[in-house]
Image (cartoon, rainbow, N blue to C red):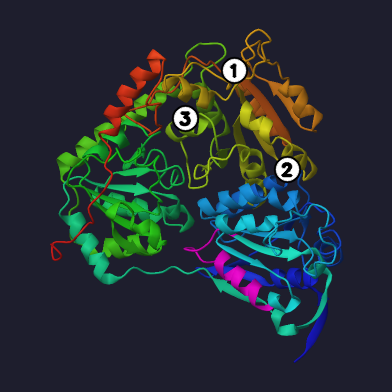
Amino acid sequence: MNTVRLTVAQAALKFLAAQYSERDGARQRLIPGVWGIFGHGNVAGLGQALEEYGDELNLPTYRPQNEQGMVHVAAAFARHKNRLQTFACTASIGPGSLNMLTGAALATVNRLPVLLLPSDIFANRIPDPVLQQLEHPLEHDLSVNDCFRPVSRFYTRISRPEQLLSALPEAVRVLTDPAETGAVVVSLPEDVQTEAYDWPESFFAERVWRVRRPPPELEVVQQAAELLRNAQRPLIVSGGGVIYSGADRHLAGFAEAFGIPVVESQAGKGSLVWDHPQNAGPVGSIGGSAANRLAREADVVLAVGTRLGDFVTASKTAFQNPEVQFIGLNVVPMDAAKLGALSLVSDAREGLNALQAALEGWAGTASATRTAASDLITEWHGLVDAQRADTGSTPPAQGAVIGTVNSVTGENTTVICAAGSMPGDLLRLWRPTDSKSYHVEYGFSCMGYEIPAGIGVALAQPDRRVVVMIGDGSYLMMNSEIVTAVAENLNLTVVLVDNRAYMSIRGLQMECGSPSFNNELRHRNPETGRTDGPVVNVDFVMHARGMGAQAVRAETLEELQTALENAGQQGGVQVIVVPVNLRERVPGFDSWWDVPIAEVSEQEQVRQTREHYEEKVGAQRAYFAPTRSKQEV
């Protein structure tokens, strides 16, 4: 057997450079680059390997400012690439690697592939404890990297070079499996990274991993078709799996063929263009009027590619029909079975095609049902128009800011957000023109995701305009990646909505009956001892300029429009700071989210809110009976 002598780090890179994903005949490099922050745990291992072999292997190295941020970049890149490509990320031992933990959880929650190569303590245990090592009195082999185990889909520690031969192929298998994918962690002790081994040359041969499209079981397809044929008010819930599968055209054709309205989750928004006649808008806790009313009365719900999280189900109050039945069309068996659904385990595109074939000859929903849904959709578009309109206030309302950004940036634009009040407002008000127009991370709703995600999307599709919409609270958490975007010469527009607070949680806090407390950006008041003093004035324009970006402040919608137009013409990293009116908020539209209220309080408002909460809890459905076909009944 022919062999080549390389270090573990060098071999790992050479292996990764030869891995490809393939779906529907299209092949691409699975790992097109590596993000890294170097320290004593990886600078002489993976750092050395990247410097010596990175160019030869066509594996460029990117340098972020924060380890968590680089994992967010990789996750956003993978999402925009429909999970067919991702980046590898490396960090030094201790705090460097542990900083990637939040990003790993985000990727796993959102079913997004990322490859993490955290450095670990010495395998030989001679320098013990090494700098930044956490010691445990009972488990000598434990390190902080063990924290990755519960938030990852695959975890291994390489304590001997030859373990790489079996570990890396398994890691790539998980990365490219649509049902199992998430954070994949290969922990590399710093001494093992530098150890040499005689590797089989065949280990580095090109390998193509087919991203499978599992077909549905025909028997289950027939059962699902029967349920839909007998439905009076069927409904489709579209999730992110529709987009990852590339099934948006198939969903549109299916909905049109049978006149079934489609409602959206956060990840599924964009699976139908905003003005598609069957698009009833977002459903659930931050949903719209049309979708929530349709969900309330639906008797058969086809959930396609969605995790059916509590925001989609409005904490299990959205679907009120006592006879409602669910069909779970999902590549992940766990998700397909939720809410007692008939589990149609399948790729979204393949499942929709099989269902449409099984329903051939069915006329679809009754004309009266279609008309009623169409009327609700028309009404919803009018409500959205009103929320996006200029109310004349200064500073402008957040809904009007969103409408202006959407209108000015136009098609071939991706909007990015993750946390605060804007994800809900964007879900209701942003009008996507294709499946990549909308990128809101809401599985983990991680503050700080937004700017790194903008970098990921800009790298995934350089010819697309990328607009990050971010609140000042989230901006203050992880603005440092603006420096990275500047260094990489990327085109990125950041619309920083300044409301001087964590206003989403402040609003929720007050809805829960409490006065505003510790959510506004204020000085500590020496008289009260609380943070209720004067507002802290942060000059976000000067701050962004200090990191190399171009920055302006827009006080009005007209100034915002001009700033957006200039940003598009000038390119580069542009930050537009927009203050918003705190009093004009987008309403709830028949929605609810379960946030428990204090059962005992001396505050009258809390007690009243608790009474209202108990009424809403009474509408929850703790259990959905398993869906069964007529034959089973």
Q: Which mark is residue 442?
A: none
Residue 56 in view of the camera: no
Q: Given contact means CB atoms under 8 Å apart, are the residues at marks 3 and 2 in contact?
A: no
Q: Which mark is residue 490?
A: 2
Q: Which residues are magenta?
A: 165-183
Picture mark count: 3
In which image quadrant can residue 18 be found? bottom right
Residue identified by numbered label 3: 425
> Disc 1 residue type?
Glu
Q: Is residue 588 above or below residue 209?
A: above
Q: Is residue 516 shown left or right of residue 512?
A: right
In which image quadrant can residue 175 be found? bottom right
Q: Is residue 492 shown left or right of residue 81?
A: right
Residue 311 position within the rendered picture, expressed as x and y whole percent measured from the top left:
40, 39
Which residue appears at 77% of the width and 59% of the height? 60
> Disc 3 residue type?
Asp
Residue identified by numbered label 1: 558
Q: Is residue 481 above or below residue 625?
A: above
